[in-house]
Image (spheres, rainbow, N blue to C red):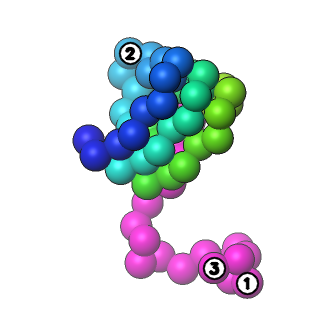
Amino acid sequence: MRSVLFPGVTVAPGAVVHDSIVMHDTMVGRGSVLDRVIIDKSVRIGDGVKLGVGSETVPNRACPDHL
C-alpha cells in the first residue's frame, strides 16, 4: 500500500503498513498498524501497536502546541 520498506524490514503476520516509510532492519509486530508514519532504522514495534492511525482532521487536544 504505497509504502517504502528498506532492506531487512520484517512485517509480522497480521500487521498493516500503509503509506509509510520503514527504514533498515526494523521489525513490525503481529497485528500492528502503521499509517502515514516514518520509522527510523533498527526499531522494534511491538505486537498490536497502532501508529499514525486516526483522522488527520482531529486536532491534538492533549498538546495543541505540537501541531
Q: Which mark, by number, is residue 27?
A: none
Judge by depth and name the residue closer to the eye, 43 or 25.
25
Q: Are marks 3 and 1 in contact (CB under 8 Å)?
A: yes
- Magenta residues span 48-67
User: In this figure, which residue is indicated by the disc labeled 1?
Assistant: 65
Q: Amino acid at mark 3?
A: Leu
Is 30 situated above or below 3?
A: above
User: In this figure, which residue is indicated by the disc labeled 3?
Assistant: 67
- State which tag comes first along the sequence, 2 or 3: 2
User: In this figure, which residue is indicated by the disc labeled 2?
Assistant: 13
Q: Residues within 10 Å of mark 3 (few under 14, many from 20)?
A: few
Alpha carbon of mark 2 to alpha carbon of mark 1: how far? Answer: 37 Å
Residue at 43 percent across and 47 percent down: it is 20
Q: Amino acid at mark 2?
A: Pro
Q: Residues within 10 Å of mark 2 (few under 14, many from 20)?
A: few
- State which tag comes first along the sequence, 2 or 1: 2
Is residue 3 found left or right of 43 in the rendered image?
left
Secondary structure beneath dot 3 equals: loop
Alpha carbon of mark 3 to alpha carbon of mark 1: how far? Answer: 6 Å
